[in-house]
Amino acid sequence: MESLIIPALILIAVVIAVLLLNRSLSRRATDYRAKHEADGAPVDAVELARESAAKLSEEQHRRLYSLIAQGQAMAAIKLYLSSTGEGLRASRDAVAALAAHPQPFRQPEPPPVDLLPDDEEPERFPYRYRAIASKGDVIREVSSNMLNDDIYGRIRTLAKSGDVEAAALALVRHSDISLAQAREFIALLED
């Protein structure tokens, strides 16, 4: 019986060491995720690849994928590092994500120009324009004599480009609805 005590104590010590190691590693992983989420850095590799590709010009994008295809990972990391000015670790992670999840080159969207100037008073038209937005069973309507196809088209462009607040403010400016009502209406246009 005494011969089993020592192996049992060793087994218990090993189990405790494994549990402590597992706890330490899971805490590090949680801290790593929290740090990257706090920095705004994507943890998801696909999202990282998408954001990394957006930082490259068309020529840089082409050269980077050429290096990846040739298996020259270090040269690709060096190119990404010099092109974006990010750190070595971030460049390594970006190139790995781009290699694992290839991204097509997309022209960067120009920042939306001021589609609706704020300095002029909205023109009043001799007719009432009706704009209707719906999603499922929810239907919203705005009727105003300060709207027309052109202005409503610009408001929709602002909403679709992601500038929801500017679209809502423009709608308030060209109609007689509140900002909360305009936000509800614009939310239906986003999809």
Image (tube, rainbow, N blue to C red):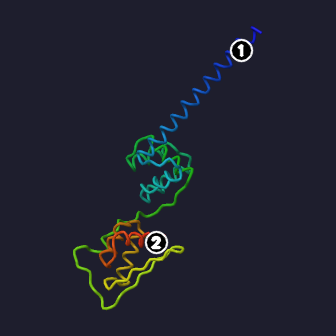
Amino acid type of the residue tagged 1 in the rendering: Pro
* Residue in the image at 62% along x and 23% along y: 16
**x, y percentage for residue 139?**
48, 77
Amino acid type of the residue tagged 2 in the rendering: Leu
Query: Left or right of 155: which side holds 91?
Result: right
Q: Earlier in the sequence, mark 2 or mark 1?
A: 1
Observer-nearest of 152 and 57: 152
Residue pointed to by mark 2: 188
* Residue in the image at 46% along x and 72% along y: 188
Q: Which of the numbered marks, if any, corresponds to residue 7? A: 1
**x, y percentage for residue 84?**
39, 50
Query: Left or right of 16: which side holds 83?
Result: left
Q: Report the quarter where the N terminus lies.
A: top right
**x, y percentage for residue 144?**
34, 83
* Residue in the image at 44% along x and 77% along y: 140
Q: CA distance from mark 2 to mark 1?
A: 68 Å
Look at the picture and state if 105 lies above or below 9: below
Q: Crowdedness of circle 1 by 10 Å Cα count: few (<14), some, many (20+)? A: few
